[in-house]
Image (cartoon, rainbow, N blue to C red):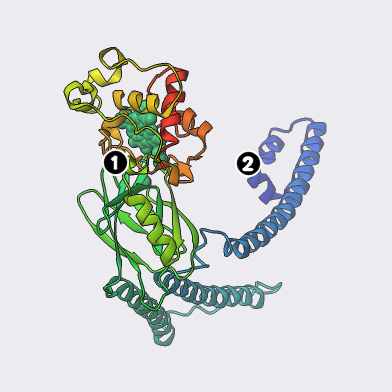
Amino acid sequence: MPVVPHLAHTLSLSPQKGNRRSKARIVKVFAIHLQRKASMRIRLNSTRGLSRIIAACAVCGASHIVAASSPTSIFSSHASSASQLTNLSIFVLVIAALIFTGVASLLIYALLRFRRRPGDVNEPPQVFGSMQIELSWTIIPILIIVVLFLGTARVLFSVQDAPKPAGALNLVVIGHQFWWEFRYPDYNVVTANELHIPVANGKVPHPTFMKLTSADVMHSFWVPQLAGKTDVLPNRVNEMWMDPQQPGLYLGQCAQFCGPQHAKMLLRVYVDTEDEFKRWIAEQQKAQAEITPAGQAPLPQPNPGNQNPAAHIAPNSPATRGDVSSQSPAISSAISPQNGQLLFEQQACINCHTVAGTVANGRYGPDLTHLMSRTTIGAGAAENTPGNLNAWIADPNTFKPGTLMPAMHLSDRQNAQITSYLLTLK
Ligand code: HEC
Ligand SMILES: [Cu+2]
């Protein structure tokens, strides 16, 4: 029975076996019918598959063009080290494209030109040990590799050995599961997740020189438009610099898997003009006590004689987990920043968070001194709105399942009180 052999093979059917067993003729006819249908479907599928691949390539190409304008595209760089990386990537891509076109066209040419034709009986001539061919396909790839190596090494050293000018801004970046801590040692400023740096294109350039390290596991600092990735490792300090040429907001993220909330460890870099940056630093240098507007009663400060015991208990010690309000001065149930602050200072919040000028001096979580100067909370997990803040305190896991801030199990009213306090942290 004439069954297309390759088809039988593809479908892993063996109609020949059925033949041998001389089944009823009607079964055979039916089998052949099925085979024909299957073969048609396969041919149909392959043309459809091909058109799908072509469509996918078109979409891919188009998305690359769109990607160049996306805020995290490596092809639209706005700082010199990032531009060098972009140029190098394009250089490598062009060489790879040339090699691909050369090899693919030779292959297609050979496939068509030297196809087996009817009447061909002999094997084509075999070429063994041709010195010329062997040399050419050894030397040409070596030359290509050398060119790629030299190009890469040049960029590598020029980025790594860049001199640090006198006006450079010093910045310390500390990766945490799952947020970023930024310290400005020259200004005594600490903030989280949202970085402000000056634009570096003035007459006196002010690039930002970073020292990066991690408080726990491996992270990677990556703001594609401003610089290459730099790994952030525990017990090691890496260095990197950025000299943004244009003010604006640049986005980035942790580029090293560091745990379940790795994808929600986003970075926002605000590149400010010189003046904006000075103003921002001046705002950040203010401690909360100085910010309290004149006329308003100062927020209650802890009384050394009657201090809240929770302030001296290490994070996670059993005493800080429960409600400690029974041991503390009574807080009225009114929702006010003052009551909020009292409550905040009686909770374990202060063991993990700092609010400068108050008893809160924890270092485990983000500095909250100027919380309201940030547009997002939880490293980009949510917008910084009163509603989200309240929901975050109630249970941070709703925004970031697996975040290392525990749900504090306070009442709705207590959450509202604390939120009203947080809203004053300008
Ligand atoms: C065990 C330590 C711990 C305790 C206790 C704690 N937090 Fe947090 N908090 C964190 C950590 C860690 C983060 C960062 C979470 C992330 O982004 O993944 C955080 C984030 C926050 C943020 C968002 C800050 C930002 O800029 O993204 C706020 C607001 C906050 N906590 C408020 C509070 C309040 C209010 C309390 C007390 C009711 C509290 N936290 C108790 C560890 C703690
Ligand atoms: Cu990370």
Task: Please give the name of the residue rendered at 39% of the width and 63% of the height, measured from the top-left corner.
Answer: 228
Number of marks drawn:
2
Name which quarter of the figure residue 295 lies in: top left
Mark whose residue sits in front, 2 or 1: 1
For the residues marked 2 and 1, what is the alpha-carbon distance in whole angstroms? 73 Å
Position above or below: 116 against 180: below
Task: Please give the name of the residue rendered at 66% of the width and 37% of the height, measured from the top-left corner.
Answer: 17
- The numbered mark at residue 289 is none
Position above or below: 232 against 361: below
Residue nearest the viewer, comparing 80 with 32: 80
Q: Give percent across and percent down for residue 401.
A: 44, 31
Position above or below: 90 against 61: below
Mark 1 lies on residue: 356
Q: Give percent across and percent down for residue 205.
A: 36, 74
Seen from this angle, which residue lies furthest bottom?
132
- For mark 1, give the secondary structure: loop
- For mark 2, give the secondary structure: loop
Seen from this angle, which residue lies furthest left?
305
Q: Residues within 10 Å of mark 1 (few under 14, many from 20)?
A: some
Mark 1 residue type: Ala
Side of 253 relative to 29 (left or right): left
The quarter in which the N terminus is drawn is top right
Nearest to N terminus: mark 2 or mark 1: 2
The quarter in which the C terminus is drawn is top left
Q: Give percent across and percent down for residue 268.
A: 45, 52
Task: Please give the name of the residue rendered at 49% of the width and 77% of the height, measured from the top-left corner.
Answer: 95
Side of 49 relative to 78 (left or right): right
Mark 2 lies on residue: 12
Residue nearest the viewer, comparing 240 with 359: 359
Mark 2 residue type: Ser
Task: Please give the name of the residue rendered at 40% of the width and 47% of the height, measured from the top-left corner.
Answer: 193
Seen from this angle, which residue lies furthest top?
326
